[in-house]
Image: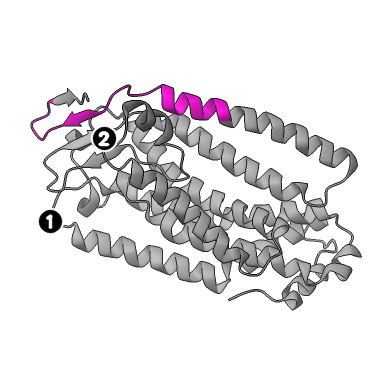
Amino acid sequence: MTSTPQDALAVTTAVAPRAAYRSPFAALARIEAWRFARHPMFLVGTALGVVFTVMALNEQAHQVTSDSLSLPVVALTVGVASMITAYHLTRSFHGAGELLEASPTSVTTRTAALCLMAGVPALVASAWLVLYYAIGPSGLSAPEWMYGPLSHAAVAAVLVENSVATAVGGTLLGIAAGRWWRFRGASAVLVLAVVVWTIGVLGAFSTTEGAPPEWFRWVRLFAPVGYFSSASADYVTVTSLTGSPAWYLVWVITLCGLAALAALLWRSEGRTRRRLVRIGAVTLALSVIAYGLASATGLSQPVRSYPDGHSVVVTR
C-alpha cells in the first residue's frame, strides 16, 4: 500500500506550468490530492467508515443513544487511514531526491502542496458530518434531554472536531512525520503513539468518579479526540462533562497548524525558515491559550440529565 519513488518521479514531470494552471504549485497540489484520493489505505479507511456508520444505524435503530457525540467514527477510520496515507506519500518523495532537487519548485513549496492533500479527507469527513448532523438519521438522533445543558453550537463544535478536524489533523501529522522520521517502522510507531495518547487519556477519564476533580477538568481534554457527554449503560441518564467544546475545537485546529508548520520547517532555509519559526511560536502560544480556555470555561461541573427533563449537578 506504500507509494513508490516512481510515483514521486511522475509528479516532478507534471509540475511545469500548463495553460490550465496559473502556477506549478497549483498543478502539484492537484496531483498530490489525486494521489491521496486513490491511495489504497485511504480507500480502505473510507470504506471502513461507511461500514461502521451503517452498522451503527442498524444497531441503534430501535433505541435512543447519544452516539452522535461520543463515537468518533471518522477519527478512528478516515483520520487514522489519512495519517498513514499521508506518511507514505510524503516518504515516496525521498526516494527521488536528486530529481526533486532539480525541479523548479522549492522543498517548502512541495511540502505546502502535500499539506493541501488534507482537503481530500476533509471532504469525506464533511459528507459524514452532513449525514450525522444536518440530515440526522432517525437511528442516531437523540432526544433533547440527552444533550443536557449543551447548546446547539456546542454540539456542532463536538461533531466538527471529531470528524473534519481530526481527518485534517491526521493528514498533516502524517506529512510532518514523513518529512522528519526516516527509521524503519515509523508509520507503525506514529499510529501507536496517537492511539496510546488518545486511549490513555480517554480511558483514564472515562468516568467522573475515577480521577480527582482538578485532573478531570484540566487533563481530560488533552487528547486529539474529545468527548463531552457520557451515557449510562442503559441510557437512563446522560452526564454532560466539563469544558468548552468551542475552545476545544480551536485547540485542535491549532494542533493542525503546528503539524503543518512542523512539516514546512523540514529543509526550509533563510527568511522562510525564520518566518515559519515566528508563526510557529505564535501558534504554540495560541494553542496553550485555547487549551486553557477549553478547560477553564464551559461547564464548571458535570451535569447529569434525566428523561423527564430535569438535571442535577454532579458533585464529588
Kind of element beneath mark 1: loop
The residue singled out by tag 2 in the image is 208
Q: Nearer the viewer, mark 1 or mark 2?
A: 2
- Residue 207 x %, y %: 26, 40
- Residue 22 x %, y %: 81, 53
Mark sitting earlier along the chain (1/2): 1
- Residue 102 x %, y %: 91, 65
| Quadrant in the picture for residue 91 | bottom right
Residue displayed at 44% across by 30% down = 246
Look at the image and give the residue range highlighted in magenta: 288-310
Left or right, 24 with respect to 180, comes to: right
Q: Quadrant of the C terminus?
A: top left
Q: Nearer the viewer, residue 119 or 295?
A: 295
The type of residue carrying mark 1 is His
Q: CA distance from mark 1 to mark 2?
A: 28 Å
Queried whether the magenta region covers residue 292, the answer comes back as: yes
The type of residue carrying mark 2 is Thr
- Residue 260 x %, y %: 66, 46
- Residue 62 - label: 1
Asked if one can make out residue 102 in the rendered structure from this viewpoint, the answer is yes
Q: Nearer the viewer, residue 207 or 27?
A: 207
Q: Nearer the viewer, residue 286 or 161?
A: 286
Residue displayed at 71% across by 69% down = 92
Q: Quadrant of the N terminus?
A: bottom right
